[in-house]
Image: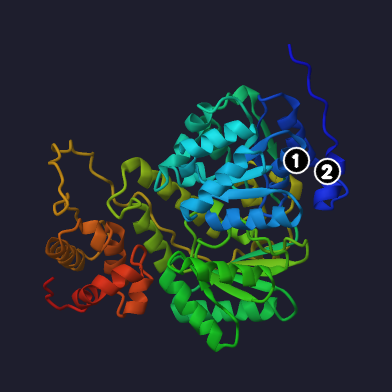
Amino acid sequence: MNAKAPQPDLDALLAAHFGFAELRPFQREAIGALLAEHEEGRVLLVAPTGGGKSLCYQLPALALPGTALVVSPLVALMEDQVRGLEARGIPATYFASTLPPEENGRRLAALRRGAFKLVYAAPERLGHAGLGAALAAAGTSLVAIDEAHCIVQWGHDFRPDYLRIGETLAQRGKARMIACTATATRAARGEIVRRLGWDPRKVVTVLRGFFRPNLTLRVARARAPREVLAEVRRALAEALAGPGAGIVYTATRKSAEALAAALRQDGWDAPAYHGGTAAAERARISAAFAARETRVLVATNAFGMGVDRPDVRIVVHAEAPGSLEAYYQEVGRAGRDGLDARGLLLVTPKDLALRRRLCRLGPDGALATRAEASRALGRLAELVRYIDGKSCRHRILLRHFGDDPRVIDGGCGRCDVCVEAEAPDTVRDPPRFEDEPEPPPKEAPPREPTSPTKRLELAAPAGVPPELFEALRRYRRARALALGVPAYVVAPNRALVEMAMLRPASTEELLGVRGMGKGRVAAHGQGFLRVIGGEAVEA
């Protein structure tokens, strides 16, 4: 039997590299569990956004021989973490498909020599033989799965490699492992453990309190876009009368662009950040916000992971998010410095109706499976219960995430429900999720082989204007036939759905449709716009 290795001096490493005098109790608990058993430590850490989760794998990576592998969802997040580590004198790097081949080879060679203490990679990179061989040569000290809630939220939809992380890592041999997330209910925690292939009896779960006493939560009702804009303006003016910053979240790219333009007219420096923004521009906007050169940022959920700005005084949701988990993570970016901060959730009946229709769609715009739709509708129902809640909003969040609501018996005394004598003026008529019973699934006929110019047709999902959807689909098919390419090259299914629902009237608005990048809009946009305008268009 091998003798247990001596425990490293964590406090000395903490002070030397991170400048902290001591670890927080939950950090010490998580790190202790990770280091307690050689190659067998399994830790699930759930702590609020900005709570110091990264330190729970970065510090052990310094303490252990070899290199730590960090599985991370976004290149921007990896770049930010690597910059921060290098600034502290800790050698780190990342691997992504965006790297030129020669740079990728240079980093692999350095990794084989043991030049890095931490290496970041997306789950899609884990199966690459070159990375696996280089990690084996360097010796893998531990594996961290950052933003582990993506296993549940993304793995079922558009990034199936998240569901294969456990299987892929198991083929690499034994290593200490820690999964970190800010948003995971009890059920989600169970699925994370199961998907990673961990033995639940050997997992140490560290759950840090979710109560944010400095954060004032409020929900307000709006009936029209002008009311939403008025509420956003009022909230920013009040919260940012002094120093600090604000983030305004929207559900779509189109809304982000429109709201940012309106706020810029008011004198705010309000760039728009979303998935359609060019990568270099996204990096510039994010860096300017982190450097406190920008006070107000308007963004979709593409912005946020890894954001480290402590003086955010307000987070406004101008449109409803898709789930309570997403809301908590995004609003949790306010007040990380411990000073007073606000979270405002604006809700319109149109927002919730749109969210409900999107719940019935898969990631490619086709109808979701019954299981996918059920999961999405369930998450939306939890959000609606929060919106219409008549008890302390912080207590609702504590119960949702499995924390003990008794830590704030009597309420927080700050949220709109606690402050007002009556429940706030929120959405009184939430969507009825069972008002359209679905027929039992029919046995699907045998599929014909597909070709580059022939794919299975789809009908307009419920709630989407069928005539316009069909016209858009016909134009896409004709365009694909004329060019000799698959239909999805012209536009993905989901883009057709959003075009039919949002009816963009210009190329700028069309760029706000998910899946319609600059190339697609330049090549096919005018035809789609003419179809939306009611013209009979030929490819």
Quadrant of residue 204 within the rendered picture: top right
Residue 330 image position (x, y, % from top left): 59, 59
Mark 2 and mark 1: span between their CA atoms?
8 Å
Q: Is residue 226 left or right of residue 269?
A: left
Residue 4 visible (yes or no): yes
Q: Which residue is mark 2?
A: 13
**Which part of the image, by quadrant, shows the N terminus?**
top right
Looking at the picture, does residue 9 appear above or below residue 55? above
Residue 532 image position (x, y, % from top left): 22, 75
Instruction: Give, as a three-letter code, the residue at label 1.
Output: Leu
Disc 1 secondary structure class: helix
Residue depicted at x 25% and y 56%: 461
Task: Mark 2 or mark 1: name the one nearer the start of the chain.
Answer: 2
Instruction: Give, as a three-letter code, the residue at label 2.
Output: Leu
Residue 401 visible (yes or no): no
Q: Is residue 478 left or right of residue 292?
A: left
Residue depicted at x 61% and y 75%: 296
Check disc 2: other Cα within 10 Å, few if <14, some if 14-19, many if 20+: some
Q: Nearer the viewer, residue 403 or 446?
A: 446
Q: Is residue 78 left or right of residue 291?
A: left
Residue depicted at x 73% and y 60%: 336
CB contact under 8 Å: marks 2 and 1: yes
Check disc 1: other Cα within 10 Å, few if <14, some if 14-19, many if 20+: many
Disc 2 secondary structure class: helix
